[in-house]
Amino acid sequence: MELHKFDYLQEMEIMLAENISKELEASINQLGKASLLVSGGTTPKGLFKILSKKAIDWSKVTIGLVDERFVSNENETSNEKLVKENLLINLASKAKFLSMVHKIEDEKENLKLVNSAYSLFFNDLTVSVLGMGEDGHTASLFPNDENSEKDLKSSKVEIISTFAPVNPKNRISCSKSLILESKSLYLMLIGPSKIEVLDKAKQNNFPISYFFRNENEELKVFFAEKK
């Protein structure tokens, strides 16, 4: 695990946006394309806005979600809505976006559709950006959730359904093994309490514990002391 500490959130956002844009650009130069999976919530909003102004060839970038709530894409809790309003703007409006909600009336059919669409990321994932909850969950992989715990012990690269302890409970998530396909994997944290959770995760099997990588594949933790 590689830890980068910052006094304030904006400093962290600027540096992280710089790192991500350089990695996307390098992939475009080498492969002619790049891919990015992002998390929802309030933590990455500032990062998204900075990233959206980076002068890279966004038309060659495919953006998806690490996880999503199984709600309408117009719902205020939708990660897709957050990404469209904060990242897919400015120069990044030219990027291709892959939704996780296609068929709100049929969860099983929706999962099939997402697995088909997200197969693009299965063997070709440039960057993923994670967050972490106070319970040590990351993506929509939760402690004490049967589907989450099964996935954390699996090596399957796929999209799964999980259940959150809070509403909206029905979630869609990239599997642990899919996220670990990332050439670069970042974790954004704000505040001392989150570092405390991360420290506890070294000794406990929290969902985030499964993302501490081997010596060849480091999880890069970007931590800001204050907002």
Image: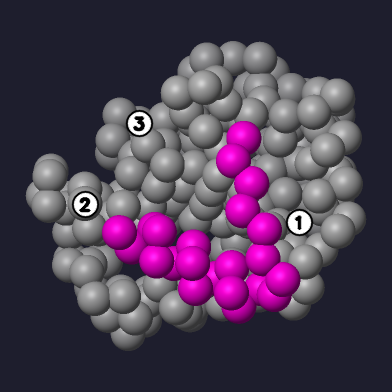
Q: What's drawn in magenta, residue-wise?
A: 1-22
Mark 1: amino acid: Pro
Dot 1 surroundings within 10 Å: few (below 14), some, or many (20 or more)? few
Dot 2 surroundings within 10 Å: few (below 14), some, or many (20 or more)? some
Mark 3: amino acid: Phe
Q: Nearer the viewer, residue 145 or 201?
A: 201
Residue 144, image x, y percentages? 86, 29
Q: Which mark is residue 168?
A: 1
Left/right placement of residue 139 relative to residue 86 reads right
Q: Earlier in the sequence, mark 1 or mark 3?
A: 3
Which residue lies under the disc numbered 2? 26
Residue 71 placement: quadrant: bottom right
Q: Residue at x 40, y 59 (%)?
A: 19
Q: Residue at x 76, y 56 (%)?
A: 168
C-beta proximity under 8 Å, tags 1 and 2 = no
Of the two numbered discs 1 and 2 in the rendering, the one whose residue sits closer to the viewer: 2
